[in-house]
Image (spheres, rainbow, N blue to C red):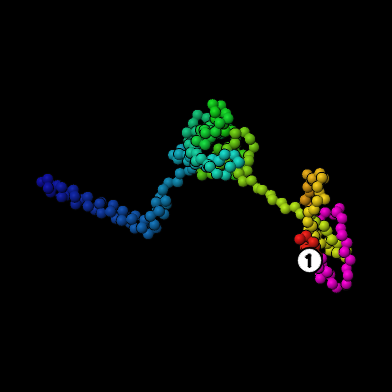
């Protein structure tokens, strides 16, 4: 009797099981045809970025000393923990971030502040923009740490100048040609110039040496001969 009862229960359950199996097979076919990733994303519930189900991403930053482009320290800052107990106060969050910067290995080795440690109180981007809100920082960003001083560019631009003595020739009142001259001893014993002014072209107030045209139509050849003569004069 028990065997017959079990057979009867099994026979009645088989159609239901086959129905569920058909549903699973059709879902598997749909997943295979649409792609695994697309199928999953299509059937997942969207979670808003501000949802409490999502933990806040921490910050990983490359911290440089103000004025330097090498020797950075990687700083990991836990935003979720730092925001506890401050009720969204951005100023307090910034203070906690600066404390974390002060505690990083590079800063702790520097002296000059309380207990032999300098206190970080300003942060800048590569372009010199000061950061006053921690939420303006992004993951893996480079920042420059200051202890109160203004931003110092990590790369210093050096301008090299080559100063030559020169005279200006006015060629038959139409064109001007600048000629280099050699330095002689006329500057010895005199006070050297300390103030310089950059102008475009030869300064208008300086003396011109007027050169008359020898033969009409020979402007180019005469100008070239002047250049050659001036070149040998400087040798």
Q: Residue furthest top?
A: 115
Label 1: which residue? 228
Tell me which residue sits at (25%, 51%) in the image: 16
Instruction: Identify which residue is drawn at 88% across, 72% down.
Output: 215
Q: Nearer the viewer, residue 64 or 212?
A: 212
1 over 170 or under it: above or below: above
Q: How many marks?
A: 1
Q: Is residue 100 visible?
A: no
In this rendering, the answer to whether 29 lies above or below 213 is above
Mark 1 burial class by Cα count in 10 Å: few <14, some 14-19, many 20+: few
Q: Residue at x 60, y 34 (%)?
A: 147
Q: Residue furthest left?
A: 1
Residue beneath the point at 10% across and 46% down:
1
Residue 77 picture location, percent across and down: 49, 37
State the image quarter where residue 167 is shown: bottom right
Residue closest to the eye, 226 or 131: 226
Q: Residue 212 in magenta?
A: yes
Q: Residue 168: x and y, percent? A: 83, 58
Residue 112 in view in this figure = yes
- Nearer-the-camera pick, 121 or 16: 121
Magenta range is: 202-226
Residue 195 at x, y percent in the picture:
79, 45
């Amino acid at each position: 009797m028990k065997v017959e009862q079990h057979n009867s229960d099994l026979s009645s359950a088989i159609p239901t099981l086959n129905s569920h199996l058909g549903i699973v097979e059709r879902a598997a076919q749909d997943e295979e045809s649409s792609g695994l990733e697309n199928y999953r994303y299509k059937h997942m519930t969207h979670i808003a970025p501000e949802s409490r189900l999502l933990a806040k991403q921490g910050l990983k930053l490359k911290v440089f000393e103000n004025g330097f482009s090498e020797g950075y320290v990687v700083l990991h800052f836990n935003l979720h923990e730092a925001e506890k107990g401050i009720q969204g106060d951005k100023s307090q969050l910034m203070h906690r971030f600066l404390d974390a910067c002060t505690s990083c290995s590079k800063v702790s080795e520097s002296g000059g502040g309380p207990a032999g440690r300098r206190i970080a109180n300003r942060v800048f981007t590569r372009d010199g923009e000061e950061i006053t809100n921690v939420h303006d920082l992004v993951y893996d960003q480079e920042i420059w740490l200051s202890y109160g001083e203004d931003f110092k560019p990590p790369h210093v631009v050096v301008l090299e100048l080559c100063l030559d003595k020169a005279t200006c020739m006015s060629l038959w009142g139409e064109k001007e040609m600048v000629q280099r001259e050699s330095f002689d001893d006329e500057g010895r014993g005199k006070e050297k110039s300390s103030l310089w002014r950059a102008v475009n072209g030869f300064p208008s107030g300086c003396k011109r040496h007027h050169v008359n045209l020898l033969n009409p139509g020979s402007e180019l050849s005469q100008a070239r001969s002047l250049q050659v003569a001036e070149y040998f004069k400087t040798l």
